């Protein structure tokens, strides 16, 4: 509503294809429209990877969480589970360890994928237990809040029920960048590559911000700041090409 007050046009549509090979750029929508753009800011975000188990969707935001920085303080003196074995999962576990009574880190394989320095830091927290070769196979609750989780061994398939108040999923995310695959430079995980400490994508006039180009810090405030920089960069790009209100009129 604030953006609309300043003249922003909001289209209830989805971009399905882009052509950045010539300028102005051409974007095609799900409804069949073609949009010509002098500059583009990409803020398509990412989708957090899910466990795909019973109770995960039902209790999302009710004990199932994806952001330790956001929610760790809500689990003070409670027992929680963190799923994952990479740097992101260890970071979540350490954030929670400061607040929670106990943190159980469930790792699917026989060892963590995280860097050794991260593992060493984790070992300093005495209220963290690591369970290897296991997966969380079910999340249970009372209808309003998580009350437990089932952890199943990958070796003998024996399941153990943990009484926990939270399950943090730290297995990463997938950026929403599929339509840019052959248009922009992406890294091996699909994130949009940016130039140095800017929001500039590999095509002049195209900018990006948020989780489509950032896989480590996925908080809304970080994405917002990035996209503000991207928008300002787009304005500078237009001004540099002498595309002003007077030109457009």
Image: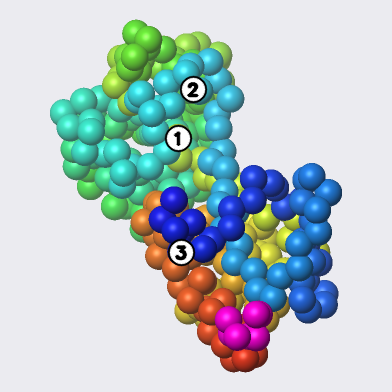
Q: Find out whether the residues at labels 2 and 3 contact each other: C-beta distance under 8 Å.
A: no
Q: Residues within 10 Å of mark 2 (few under 14, many from 20)?
A: many
Image disc number at residue 169: 1
Question: For the residues carrying marks 2 and 1, which lies nearer the camera in this image?
Answer: 2
Question: What residue is at 51 percent from the left and 63 percent from the top?
Answer: 7
242 lies left or right of 82? right
User: In the rendered image, which residue does mark 2 sit on?
Assistant: 56
First in sequence: mark 3 vs mark 1:
3
Please name whichever residue, 235 or 98, is drawn nearer the observer in this view of the structure: 235
The picture places residue 48, in percent across and down from the top left corner, at 53, 41
Image disc number at residue 6: 3
Cα gap from disc 2 to disc 3, whole angstroms: 40 Å
Image position of 180 with respect to 37: above or below: above
Cα gap from disc 2 to disc 1, whole angstroms: 10 Å
Question: What residue is at 45 percent from the left and 40 percent from the top?
Answer: 170
**Number of numbered discs on residues:** 3
- Magenta-tinted stretch: 243-249
Image position of 36 with respect to 59: above or below: below
Disc 3 element: loop
Please name whichever residue, 33 or 173, is drawn nearer the observer in this view of the structure: 33
Image position of 155 with respect to 159: above or below: below
- Residue furthest toward the top? 142
Image disc number at residue 109: none
Cα gap from disc 3 to disc 1, whole angstroms: 39 Å
Question: What residue is at 29 percent from the left and 52 percent from the top?
Answer: 121
In this orientation, does residue 82 appear? yes
74 lies left or right of 140? left
User: Does the magenta-highlighted stretch encompass residue 101?
Assistant: no
Question: For the residues carrying marks 2 and 3, which lies nearer the camera in this image?
Answer: 3
């Amino acid at each position: 509503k604030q953006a609309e007050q300043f003249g922003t046009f909001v289209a209830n549509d989805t971009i399905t294809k882009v052509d950045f090979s010539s300028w102005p750029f051409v974007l095609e929508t799900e409804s069949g429209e073609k949009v010509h753009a002098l500059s583009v800011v990409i803020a398509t975000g990412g989708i957090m990877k899910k466990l795909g188990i019973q109770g995960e969707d039902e209790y999302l935001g009710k004990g199932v969480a994806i952001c330790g920085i956001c929610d760790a303080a809500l689990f003070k003196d409670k027992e929680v589970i963190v799923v994952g074995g990479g740097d992101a999962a260890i970071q979540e576990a350490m954030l929670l360890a400061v607040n929670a009574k106990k943190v159980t880190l469930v790792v699917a394989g026989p060892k963590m994928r995280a860097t050794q320095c991260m593992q060493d830091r984790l070992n300093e927290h005495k209220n963290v237990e690591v369970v290897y070769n296991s997966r969380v196979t079910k999340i249970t609750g009372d209808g309003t809040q998580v009350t437990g989780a089932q952890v199943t061994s990958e070796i003998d398939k024996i399941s153990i029920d943990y009484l926990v108040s939270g399950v943090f999923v730290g297995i990463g995310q997938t950026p929403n960048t599929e339509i840019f695959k052959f248009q922009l430079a992406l890294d091996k995980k699909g994130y949009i590559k940016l130039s140095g400490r800017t929001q500039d994508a590999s095509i002049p006039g195209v900018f990006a911000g948020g989780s489509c180009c950032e896989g480590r810090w996925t908080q809304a405030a970080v994405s917002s700041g990035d996209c503000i920089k991207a928008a300002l960069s787009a304005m500078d790009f237009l001004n540099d090409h002498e595309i002003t209100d007077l030109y457009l009129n």
